[in-house]
Amino acid sequence: MKTDPAIVQFLCRPENVRLALQVSEAMDDAFTYLRREFEKEVCAGVQRRLNGNSFSGHFRFEPGEDIGKSNRYYGVWYIPEGISQEYYLHYSLVYAEEGGDRYLYYGLEWGSSDTAEPPGFSAKGSPLRDYLIANGYKINEWTYGWKTIEQYNGRSEFLIALVERSSGLVEECVSLFGNFFEQTVEMVLATNKKLKAERRAV
């Protein structure tokens, strides 16, 4: 989002500079607050959506953040209860800042000490991998399969979306996440079971 030059001139006036700085610093807190409220609403919506699903009790929501020098990821993870193995798959809903790209996505990610695909693991011919490819999910070594919900030109656009159409965005995320879970959960649990057996055999 480009700033109107008139606004810049207004903020640079001596009587406005201190207030402008305070507002600028407060926006980081506003981003954190709005994002976390959004995540809470999505988690609550997903739990309502999956109420009665026999597999939903095997998972729990956890906040997930990965802050690097150039890339940042904020969101929630839906993790298998009682998981103790080194490598496993978990569900995720994430707002990502990668260089100049900003987007909201959902899918499956690796949970491990390295957060990358396990050494020697092959997903070729896996029913889960076949499903993801057939349904247009993107795949890399960090994410087993993911899809973009919305893209933004900057963090400001994401903040505006959270304020102006939060309920609609929450409903969309709950619907996509809930459908994805229902369609893949048995395959995810089977894959995690296979991963556990393979690592024991190493």
Image (cartoon, helix red, strand yellow):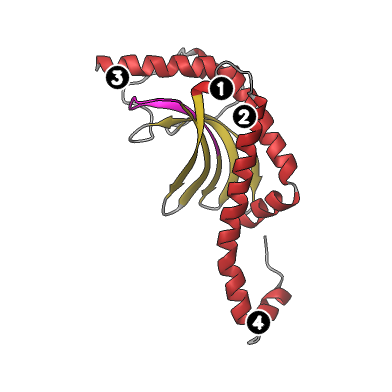
Q: Amino acid at mark 2?
A: Gln
x then y, percent, for residue 178: 63, 26
Image height of 27 relative to 37, above or below: below
Tag 2 residue: 47
Residue at x 58%, y 73% (from the top left corner): 22
Q: Amino acid at mark 3?
A: Arg
Q: Amino acid at mark 1?
A: Ser
- Whether tag 1 and tag 2 are in contact, CB under 8 A, the answer is yes
Residue farthest along the left direction in this orientation: 202
Question: Mark 1 to mark 4: distance in Å?
Answer: 52 Å
Tag 4 residue: 16
Residue at x 34%, y 36% (from the top left corner): 114
Residue at x 55%, y 53% (from the top left corner): 100
x then y, percent, for residue 169: 70, 41
Tag 1 residue: 56
Q: Quadrant of residue 19?
A: bottom right
Tag 3 residue: 199
Question: Mark 2 to mark 3: distance in Å?
Answer: 32 Å
Secondary structure category for the residue under label 4: loop
Q: Is residue 11 left or right of residue 131?
A: right
Tell me which segment is drawn in magenta: 81-93
Mark toward the start of the polypeptide (1 vs 3) = 1
Q: Amino acid at mark 4?
A: Asn
x then y, percent, for residue 3: 68, 67
**Can see residue 123?**
no
Q: Nearer the viewer, residue 145 or 189?
A: 189
Image height of 107 relative to 74, above or below: above
Mark toward the start of the polypeptide (1 vs 4) = 4
User: Does the magenta-highlighted stretch encompass residue 168?
Assistant: no
Residue at x 58%, y 23% (from the top left corner): 181
x then y, percent, for residue 84: 35, 26
